[in-house]
Amino acid sequence: MRWPPVIPANRMAAAYTAGALTGGPRVALLVVMMVTFALGECAYSPAFYTVVERIAPKGTLGRSSGAAWAVFQVGNTIGPPIAVFLVGGDVPFWLVLATAAVAAAALVLIVARRMHAAPEPALAAR
């Protein structure tokens, strides 16, 4: 057996399709989600760093790229332990998702207000 085991994409697609046809609505929804995610990744991935390059202030491209990449790494680091806790615990999953959505929306509002706030008069005079 080769390491790492490689599963060709056509076999994986056939397995997911067979699961969707025989596994009921949950598996079918999982397949729909995976296809939607894959199409989104195909559209998003090639343009991501181009967008970062365009919106980064002059002289901060390295820092901006690092910050953009750090978001992915934080998700890759803390995502699996949180998922294991949610799958193995007695916490209602919908409650966790709703709390995360509200917290994310609040964070976006806080950051947006700070980014677009008028400069303080003492700092503007310098």
Image (cartoon, rainbow, N blue to C red):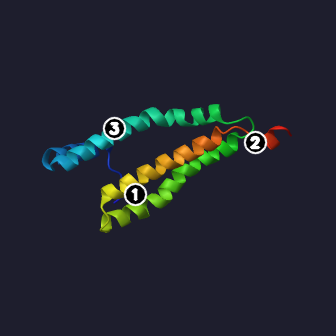
Under tag 3, what secondary structure?
Answer: helix
Q: Is residue 86 above or below residue 24?
A: below
> Among all residues in the image, which is located at the extreme front?
121
Disc nearer the start of the sequence (2/1): 1
Q: Residue at x 58, y 33 (%)?
A: 51
Using the numbered discs, state the Cα–Cα distance from disc 3 to disc 1 in whole angstroms. 27 Å
- Where is residue 126, by image quadrant? top right
Q: Is residue 88 left or right of residue 44?
A: left
Local secondary structure at mark 1: loop
User: Which amino acid does the dot numbered 2 rest on?
Assistant: Glu
Residue 64 position within the rendered picture, expressed as x and y whole percent measured from the top left: 65, 43
The kind of secondary structure element at disc 2 is: loop
Foreground mark, 2 or 1, reads 2
Q: How many neighbours does mark 1 have within 10 angstroms: few (below 14), some (14-19), or many (20 or more)?
A: few
Q: Position of residue 25 (x, y in %)?
A: 17, 47
Could you tell me which residue is drawn at 58 percent across and 37 percent down? 49
Rendered location of residue 19, percent (x, y): 19, 48
Which residue, given by chain and number where applicable, does mark 2 sit on? Answer: 120
Mark in front: 3 vs 1: 3
> Mark 2 or 3, which is nearer the eye?
2
Q: Residue at x 80, y 38 (%)?
A: 124
Between discs 2 and 3, the one toward the N terminus: 3
Q: Which residue is mark 3?
A: 36
Disc 2 to disc 1, C-alpha distance: 56 Å
Check disc 2: other Cα within 10 Å, few if <14, some if 14-19, many if 20+.
few
Task: Name the mark on residue 4.
Answer: 1
Which numbered dot is residue 54?
A: none
Amino acid type, label 1: Pro
